[in-house]
């Protein structure tokens, strides 16, 4: 019984530490240089950003007994503090001589004045095929302007969550 209580306390400490790191990195990224980073983000081609998303998620690898890579992330994309987080799923799988990647973003809205309970208000998807380091967008629910602002934020969020995950795994 004591072991279970100790494990509960340790897991709560790890979660609290991860949350603190997430908050700290959010404040650090909202520094005055943000306007400069937004301009450089928007100059990148969406296919190049998708290639970087593919690389970042591929590095995480597949889970045991799965022949595909599926990773889920939670971070703020719409800068709306009342709904705080969007849910991003990246799925990579083989089809014949190429790979396919699906990036799904779910946006939430709070239920009434309660910010704890949230409902999905919109789901947007990007479907890509990858062959020999060339990414082709097959279908996309975003227009070009939206892609140039959303995809860099998705990439940045994935990188931040990967850093937090590495810190948790290393025990820092």
Image: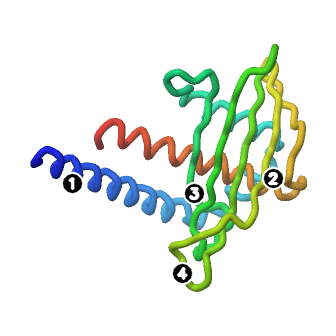
The residue that disc 2 covers is 148
Estimate the spatial distance between the alpha carbons at disc 1 and disc 4, rounded to whole Å. Answer: 28 Å
Estimate the spatial distance between the alpha carbons at disc 2 and disc 3, rounded to whole Å. Answer: 18 Å
Estimate the spatial distance between the alpha carbons at disc 3 and disc 1, rounded to whole Å. Answer: 25 Å
| Secondary-structure class at tag 3 | strand
Q: Residues within 10 Å of mark 3 (few under 14, many from 20)?
A: some
Taking the spot 55% from the left edge, 26% from the top edge, the residue there is: 61
Q: Nearer the viewer, mark 3 or mark 4?
A: 4
Q: Disc 3 vs disc 4: Cβ atoms closer than 8 Å?
A: no
Expressed as whole percent of the image width and height from the top left, the position of residue 76 reads 60, 62
Expressed as whole percent of the image width and height from the top left, the position of residue 123 reads 75, 57
Q: Residue furthest bottom?
A: 113
Sequence-first tag of 4 and 2: 4
Sequence-first tag of 1 and 4: 1
Estimate the spatial distance between the alpha carbons at disc 2 and disc 1, rounded to whole Å. Answer: 42 Å
Taking the spot 51% from the left edge, 61% from the top edge, the residue there is: 26
The residue that disc 4 covers is 114
- In this rendering, the answer to whether 84 lies above or below 133 is below
| Secondary-structure class at tag 4 | strand
| Secondary-structure class at tag 1 | helix
Sequence-first tag of 2 and 1: 1
Q: Residue furthest front?
A: 1
Judge whether residue 40 can be spotted in this image: no
Q: Disc 3 vs disc 1: Cβ atoms closer than 8 Å?
A: no
Sequence-first tag of 3 and 1: 1
Question: Quadrant of the image for the C terminus?
Answer: top left
Taking the spot 37% from the left edge, 42% from the top edge, the residue there is: 167
The residue that disc 3 covers is 75
Taking the spot 50% from the left edge, 41% from the top edge, the residue there is: 162
Sequence-first tag of 2 and 3: 3
The residue that disc 1 covers is 9
């Amino acid at each position: 019984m004591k072991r279970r209580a100790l494990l509960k306390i340790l897991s709560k400490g790890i979660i609290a530490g991860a949350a603190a790191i997430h908050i700290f990195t959010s404040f650090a990224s909202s520094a005055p240089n943000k306007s400069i980073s937004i301009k450089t983000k928007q100059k990148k081609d969406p296919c190049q950003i998708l290639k970087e998303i593919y690389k970042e998620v591929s590095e995480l690898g597949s889970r045991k007994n799965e022949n595909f890579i599926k990773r889920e992330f939670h971070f703020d994309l719409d800068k709306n503090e009342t709904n705080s987080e969007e849910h991003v799923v990246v799925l990579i799988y083989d089809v014949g001589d190429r790979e396919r990647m699906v990036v799904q973003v779910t946006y939430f809205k709070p239920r009434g004045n309660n910010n704890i309970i949230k409902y999905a208000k919109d789901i947007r998807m990007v479907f890509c095929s990858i062959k020999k380091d060339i990414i082709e967008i097959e279908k996309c629910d975003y227009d070009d302007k939206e892609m140039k602002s959303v995809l860099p934020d998705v990439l940045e969020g994935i990188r931040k969550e990967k850093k937090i995950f590495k810190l948790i795994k290393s025990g820092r």
